[in-house]
Image (cartoon, helix red, strand yellow):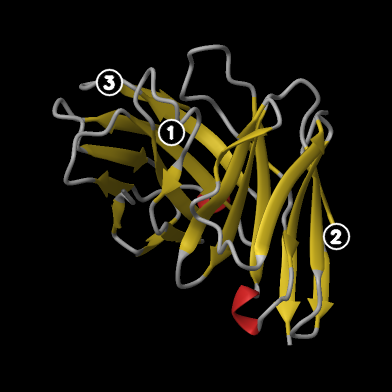
Amino acid sequence: QQPVQSPQAVILREGEDAVINCSSSKALYSVHWYRQKHGEAPVFLMILLKGGEQKGHDKISASFNEKKQQSSLYLTASQLSYSGTYFCGTGPNAGSSNTGKLIFGQGTTLQVKP
Amino acid sequence: DARVTQTPRHKVTEMGQEVTMRCQPILGHNTVFWYRQTMMQGLELLAYFRNRAPLDDSGMPKDRFSAEMPDATLATLKIQPSEPRDSAVYFCASGFFPEGETNEKLFFGSGTQLSVL
């Protein structure tokens, strides 16, 4: 089942914050976040597996709510380099035969302006 | 610096022609994925392999698409015959999944930009 991302697009000024949401009507086993810069391949950001988990590096972090139906990606004090399309993906349950199967949302395009 | 290599980077072909896209996964990775990216559909999973065996190709139009891994260093995606609606960027990604693990980081190749006229 494809997760739903919101918003579809965000325009920011440098230094502003943004939140991108990824949700599903069913509980998710895991949430994966990737960023794709224009004309490039998607690049891994992080995976969250546990309800209530928070992860982050530098000024990009993510959370996974207790019910495991929503994840949010937080970009604080945005930089020009943060521009791109952010995808969340949902992974399979542990023990599933669908090893590694990752279904992505539609993506959120983030544009950071000077 | 290990990376996933895809060829060709760009392909323009005419409707009805056969198209073959190739992917060299990162050495040691045991799982390979094919995704298709379009503006309308986003990143769609077409097929994926573990230890060269196909695990799921339900995302692929069966009548014209085929995916194989002739050996651990090569994955191929073939379209025959190609149609204009196949125009998209096709990404290959690989990852190492230890036994029993289902969620691991993927490394994407640079993609093949396919245009079918």
Q: In the rendered structure, the residue with mark 1 lies on which chain? A: A
Image vertical order of residue A99 relative to residue B32, above or below: above
From where the camera sits, is residue A21 visible? yes
- Disc 2 marks which amino acid? Pro
Q: In the rendered structure, the residue with mark 2 lies on which chain? A: B
Q: Are marks 2 and 3 on the same chain?
A: no
Across and down, in percent, residue A9 comes to 37, 65
Instruction: Name the residue nearer the viewer: A47 or B89.
Output: B89
Across and down, in percent, residue B36 comes to 59, 59
Instruction: Name the residue nearer the viewer: A81 or A90.
Output: A90
Instruction: Name the residue nearer the viewer: B25 or B71.
Output: B71
- Disc 1 marks which amino acid? Lys
Position of B38 compared to A41: left or right?
left
- Disc 3 marks which amino acid? Glu
Tell me which numbered mark, 1 or 3, is placed earlier along the sequence. 3
Q: Residues within 10 Å of mark 1 (few under 14, many from 20)?
A: few
- Determine the secondary structure under disc 3: loop
- Residue on which the image places disc 3: A53
Position of A66 compared to B47: left or right?
left
- Residue on which the image places disc 1: A59
Residue sitting at x 44%, y 39%: A33
- Residue on which the image places disc 2: B8
Residue sitting at x 84%, y 33%: B73
Q: In the rendered structure, the residue with mark 3 lies on which chain? A: A
Residue sitting at x 39%, y 18%: A95
